[in-house]
Image (cartoon, rainbow, N blue to C red):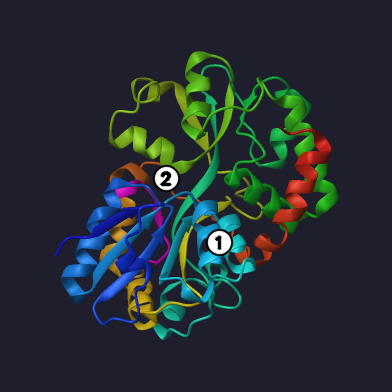
Amino acid sequence: MTTKTFFLGALTAAVATTVAAEGELNLYSSRHYDTDEQLYTEFEEATGITINRIEGKADELLARMQAEGANSPADVFVTVDTSRLSRAKNAGVLQPIDSAVLEEKIPANLQDEDNQWFGFSQRSRIIFFDKADVATPPATYLDLAKPEYKGLVCVRSSSNTYNQTLLAAIVTNHGEEVAKDWAAGIVENMARAPQGGDTDQLRGIVSGECEIAVSNSYYFARAIRKNVKGVSDHLDMIGWTFPSQEAEGAHMNLSGAGVAAHAPNKENAIKFLEYLSSDSAQKYFSGGNDEFPVVAGVELAPSVAKLGAFKADDVLLSEVAKNIPVAQKIFNEVGWK
């Protein structure tokens, strides 16, 4: 059975007017990883349910779901990062669900407090550094703002959802005043104006533009597993540290999903979310996209395992999500572009 993919703006009239139909699932996804194809194929083969997939950017999909309202064909919304999951909840396009399977398998801190979204894979936002030039890398996120690292740090823009959620987590763990001082310190320590994606921050170390970079773990793990231009040939020069191991632990970003508010195939939608928590799906998140599983005991891919053991921050991400507007306010106040 073949997954049917529809890109945003190309959804057929037949799907747009769908009603509850046994054997179908309409998936709105902003995850754009070719390796996820195996996840969808395995679910279809195991259940006989056909996935109709609509892809687009997260904000575009959310706007579409809001515009479609009660007539939306969406059954499941999949996206990356807590900030986007929170926006979906606040936009009213998700619904709470009851699932003993999800409650058992997904750690409580990786669930929405109202069960409107669940995390299914994780990436740690960690600190990378030039091993030749940085004898003492920052041990915590707060250390990144110390004057001794002035002019050394490459980091993405404040519009990046990963940074928004990291700052929101700092607000949650340390308070707004500490978070604002930290953000102001990072601005002072930037080696260049924020630019590019996470891989570009790693390339900044290789090129010598900066000596310290902030990036999600899976970008580096991917460069271990396969060739990533400008990074894979220079892995030996890059060191990394999981921050705040003596305090709250390393910050974790999520990929997650929720059942759409007006899902015409709600039972199938819940089945799909439960499938994403299965050991086989969790193992594939790691092996196929270099992410950390959320279910305990699932084997890590070699590229991910090479990063080493660490303590993860177990802060409630539903609480972090509430501080994302505060984080954006702080970014604006300190001039983090």
Rendered image: mark on residue 148: none
Of the pair 316 and 131, the residue shown nearer to us = 316
Q: Residues within 10 Å of mark 1 (few under 14, many from 20)?
A: many
Residue at image position (43%, 50%) is: 56
Residue 252 percent coordinates (x, y): 54, 53
Residue 184 visible in rendering: yes
Q: Position of residue 94 (x, y in %)?
A: 53, 72
Amino acid, disc 1: Leu
Would you say 117 lies left or right of 40 here? right
Query: Above or below — where is 199 with respect to 77?
Result: above
Classify mark 2: helix, strand or loop.
loop
Q: Amino acid at mark 2?
A: Gly
Q: For this view, does 37 lie left or right of residue 220?
A: left
- Secondary structure, mark 1, is helix
Q: Position of residue 211 (x, y in %)?
A: 58, 21
- Is 290 magenta? The answer is yes
Return the x and y of residue 57 as percentages of the image width and height.
48, 49
Instruction: Write the residue at 59% across / 47% down.
Output: 161
Q: Is residue 220 magenta?
A: no
Which region shows up in magenta? 288-298
Q: Is residue 77 left or right of residue 304?
A: right
Q: CA distance from mark 1 to mark 2?
A: 28 Å
Q: Residue furthest front?
A: 13
Q: Is residue 300 visible?
A: no
Q: Which of the numbered marks, if any, corresponds to residue 308? A: 2
Q: What number is the disc on residue 85? A: 1
The foreground one among 311 and 279 is 279
Q: Nearer the viewer, mark 1 or mark 2?
A: 1
How would you classify the magenta stretch by its main secondary structure? loop
